[in-house]
Image: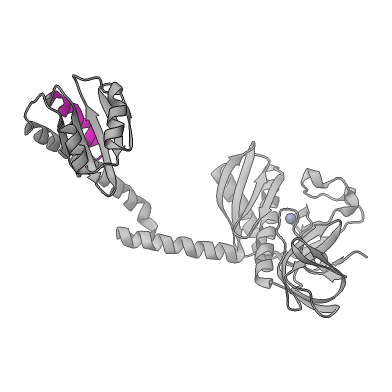
Amino acid sequence: MKTKKLYETDGMLFSFRANIMETRETEKGYGIVLDQTAFFPEGGGQTADTGYIDDARVLDVQIVGGEIVHFVDRLPKEKEVSCRLDADERFRKMQNHLGEHLLCGAIHKLYGYENVGFHLGADYMTFDVSGPMTAEQIYEAELLANGAVAENAPVRCYYPENVSALDYRAKSEKLEDVSEIRIVEVEGFDRCACCAPHLDEAGKVGLIKIVDAMKYKGGMRFWALCGFDALADYDHRLTEIRKVSALLSAKPTEIAEAVKSKLDEIGELKKTVGALKRELNAMKLASIERTDENICIFDDSMDGNTMREFATGGMKKTSAVFAVFAGTDETGYQFVIGSEGIKLKARIPEFKSALGGKCGGSDKMLFGHADKSKAEIEAFFAR
Ligand SMILES: [Zn+2]
């Protein structure tokens, strides 16, 4: 006997009584087949419902060999059981799923595109449409879908007697067996072939918001949130905006301008710091006497670029090797080694074994990271 799918006729049914027809032990735990169920098994891009069968936790629901199997953490003692879904979670999914129908219906009405992909997970919903859209077109579709919510049209789910006479949207791969086609109809707005449970009124969807969009396979992929998920997302975004607004001492509605002016300020400061660093490098170099010995300098204030510039000037101060190190004995040292008189590449193995770590570059300049202590490095260059 096939399980009666209560979720197909009444999406708002969150608790019900049923009889256990069969139990099985599987790799995924115990499996239960009921005579009727409101638990939606995973399918059509939507994850399975969870909840309880008596005191057994329903962890997953799958169609296995044509049967709806409820995977539970234990077997109930009685044959007749009382079942309840995690209603908040199911309601959230139905808000998102019907919201997707309304968005795809709106896009179809406005631009004639088909819905070609759908995923409804725990954290987000995505759907794909068959043609490209501009930001303005996306907003138009959003407005139309939210208008359908405001109209609060009734939603009906049914198996039509004459499918071929009916105008409805469907993903092409689902058209093979027309007797299996179930229609979800938002009265006066949209008809779509769909196997999932649905809200009974469009108004229950609440706010519909597309939060992200990208071009995808010649069409579009959208990330959207509906109802309580949209509210939670709005709240999260507002909290973040308030934090940024407080940090910038700017009104929440004017943070973009405030960020731009801060970035401009940072750009100016970078220019000033760059000029000061070059000036400081020149002063440090001026204090170094010309020699035929190696020169080895430790300076923790330098970043990579500054070290490179310092070494470029420093190698003119010696016929031997000029080396600059930044770091500590604990973290190791970044270094730049330069020379005008000695071909450095041939000496890489020697530097690697004396300094530890890594070393590479050109004949004129080597870059690397040393593991040895300051005392060991100084001793090596003092030879
Ligand atoms: Zn659907």
At x 62%, y 59%, the residue is 146
Q: Foreground: 278 or 368? A: 368
Q: Residue 129, how many percent across, how many down? A: 67, 44
Q: Where's ligand 1: which quadrant?
A: bottom right
Asked if the stretch drawn in magenta spans residue 305, the answer is: yes
Q: Foreground: 309 or 160? A: 309
**Residue 312 vertical position relative to residue 171 in the rendered view, above or below:** above
Q: Residue 114, how many percent across, how many down? A: 72, 44
Quadrant of residue 294 within the rendered picture:
top left
At x 20%, y 43%, the residue is 374
**Residue 296 vertical position relative to residue 373 in the rendered view, above or below:** above
At x 26%, y 41%, the residue is 372
Tell me the quarter of the image containing the N terminus. Answer: bottom right
Question: What range is drawn magenta here?
Answer: 303-316
Instruction: Please give left or right for residue 23 compared with residue 11 in the image.
Output: right
Q: Residue 349, how many percent across, how many down? A: 32, 28
The colour scheme used here is one colour
Secondary structure of the magenta portion, mostly? Answer: helix
